[in-house]
Image: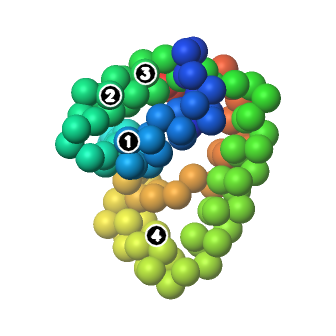
Amino acid sequence: LMREGTSTRSAAQVAEAAGGMGGALGISVGSDQTTIALDVLGEFTADAVALVADVATQPALPASELTRVRDNLLRQLTVTRSTPDTLAAERFAATLYPNHPYGRILPTDAQLEAYTLAAVKEAS
């Protein structure tokens, strides 16, 4: 939901600002960290830092987008789980870290479906 705008910019404005600097905003979440990245031309460094700071510290987290974002994640998860490399990585992690969060590299469908806006805000 962090891509869906901030308290000062709409999602379209965030995308346009990043694009205007020759880049695209990237947000990824891992088991230990969340990364917000923006690769831009050097002349736009200060503006890029301001945009990343805005997204990181003032996400709008609009309730109207939660269902769409969650449904997209569920579709992506289904596709991801169908690839051999993901299946191997899941089994490897489960073997290496049994009964531990590191042993689960992807959320379950039930976990994604249980996300509420309150839980998202609490985690952000």
Residue at disc 1, secondary structure? loop
**Residue at figure coordinates x 55%, y 15% from the top left:** 8
Foreground tag (2 vs 3): 2
- Farthest residue toward the left? 42
Residue to which mark 4 is pinned: 90
Query: Disc 2 versus disc 3: distance between alpha carbons?
Result: 11 Å
Q: How far apart are marks 1 and 3 (CA)?
A: 15 Å
Indicate which disc, 2 or 3, sits on the residue closer to the N terminus. 2
Q: Earlier in the sequence, mark 4 or mark 3?
A: 3
Q: Which amino acid does label 1 sit on?
A: Met
Above or below 40: residue 82: below
Using the rendered view, name the quadrant where residue 97 is placed: bottom left
Residue position marked by numbered label 2 in the rendering: 47
Residue in the image at 78% along x and 40% along y? 67
Please indicate, yes or no, whether residue 81 appears anywhere in the rendered image.
yes
Pinpoint residue 121: horizontal percent, then vertical percent: 58, 21
Asked if disc 4 and disc 1 are in contact, CB closer than 8 Å, the reply is no
How far from the left and from the top, in percent, is residue 112?
67, 46
Q: Which amino acid does label 4 sit on?
A: Glu
Label 3 sits on residue? 54
Q: Name the residue under label 1.
A: 21
The residue lying at 57 percent from left, 22 percent from top is 9
Separation of marks 2 and 4 at Cα, in angstroms: 39 Å
Number of residues whose C-alpha sits closer than 10 Å to that of mark 2, classed few (under 14), some (14–19) or many (20 or more): some
